[in-house]
Amino acid sequence: MTKVLDEGSSDQAIIELDVDERDPFGLFDACSAAGWTDGLPVVPPTEARVHAMLAAGPWRSSDILLREPVRARDVSAQMIAANAVMAGCLPEYFPVVGAVMTAISDPHFGLHPVATSTGGAGIVIIINGPIRDSLGVNYRHNLLGPGTRPNMAIGRTVRLVLRNCLGAIPGVLDQSTQGWPGKLSCCFGEHEAASPWEPLHRSRGVTNGASAVTVFASESGHDVVNHSATTPEALLATFVDTMRALGSFSPGRSLLVFAPEHATKLGAAGWSREMVQHYLYSHSTRTLSELKAGGKVEDGNAIEPLEWFRSGSALRPGDENVFIHRGASPDDILCVVGGGDAGGHSTFFPSWSRGRSVTPITQEIPQ
Amino acid sequence: MKIRLVNPVMHGPQTIVQPARRPASLDRIVLGLIDNGKTHATELLTGVAAQIAKRHAINTAMVRKQIVSLPPSDADIETLAKQCGAILTAVGD
């Protein structure tokens, strides 16, 4: 069904599929049979659609937007644009897609293990700044779920690029033990107006008036439900209890998406983002004896420089008095606001990996 | 009927990496071992090195990565480059 026009190379720019372009089911079947999809229908990346996508960004078709050094993959803007078309992006989304590609190319992001490890990371994308509204990115009701085109299509583009350009196919290079639904797409805007704090991108050095994406390689989110707390301490106790759970406990980073209702309570009490970060870091602890009893400290494991993580699994006198924090400092906790106005439902995203493999990256979106 | 589409798939490396020159023999070289830091990496590497040592007169030098998903530090790479005639690395989870 698939024919490579120029048989002299395995990476030809244009290929032909033997299918009637007026037959949508036939097109989906053909794209699926070619191995291009995540299981859902895709928009066929015709030359006209890809050219329109490229025209909406500042890059030439041959510019490299994504670099993955472990497997020596340099992915061109044209290749990214083709996958953006397939994911359902409108051309005006492309500057955001390009910024995401730049962000996940940062060596500190560690894209190769994110794409391949048993940990099954999803890439959470947070959009800040004026472009959020100009594209219609959802930051309110059901922002973590389906229902809004830019949220779904931008995140889905990343997944298709990982599959089609980096070979992250489940069971092949994507060795996720289970994965999670956010691997299909987990992209949302910050509800900046509902936040008592500076918008995330401004707190991370992006200038006023600019738009940005922040990427965070993550496990699946954990709901933090609290409808009744009347003090910041009582409210944050629920967050702490979620963050210190053994299942996701690690020296890694955290992303908290505060519901507007929760953020309003904290803001009304005068709690700054820094106060919240400090409180959560200070209280999200386990004793070393708990971690050892729970099998969270492995003999011979040296994947992190933190002393407790490599101290060996044998219980020692005094371990019950050694308190280990989630993360390495309050700055390891990213705090953003998003969701519908009503409801005490926030979300805790633990960073992927049992160590500190992942650093969140913020990238300005070109105008 | 056929439809022309922009190929969304990349099959091979786009950057050509020149492999290091291979030693003619392992005898009398220092074999560098890069431990990725996971639980059984040391065991796996030292076991393989022990098997090689039965056949060749080698010495070994080991470095352990600080973060499993990132390359060794520049200092460790420099040390290995100066000392070693060959390098082994392994994932031992």
Image: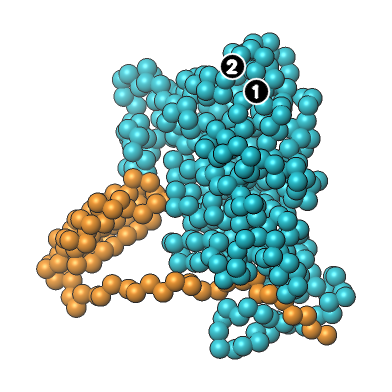
List x then y, in percent, for residue A205.
Answer: 52, 37
Chain B's colour? orange
Q: Quadrant of residue A287?
A: top left
Question: Relative to residue A352, is residue A355 drawn left or right?
Answer: left
Image point (61%, 25%), residue name:
A197
- Mark 1 belongs to which amino acid? Pro
Quick check: A22 above or below A318? below
Crowding at label 1, few (<14), some or many (≥20) Cα neighbours within 10 Å? many
- Mark 2 belongs to which amino acid? Trp
To which residue does mark 2 refer?
A: A271
Q: Nearer the viewer, residue A312 or A33?
A: A33
Quick check: A224 above or below A107? above
Q: Please, what secondary structure does the residue beneath circle 1 have?
A: loop
Which one is earlier in the sequence, the residue at label 1 or at label 2? Answer: 1
Indicate which disc residue A222 carries: none
Q: CA distance from mark 1 to mark 2?
A: 9 Å
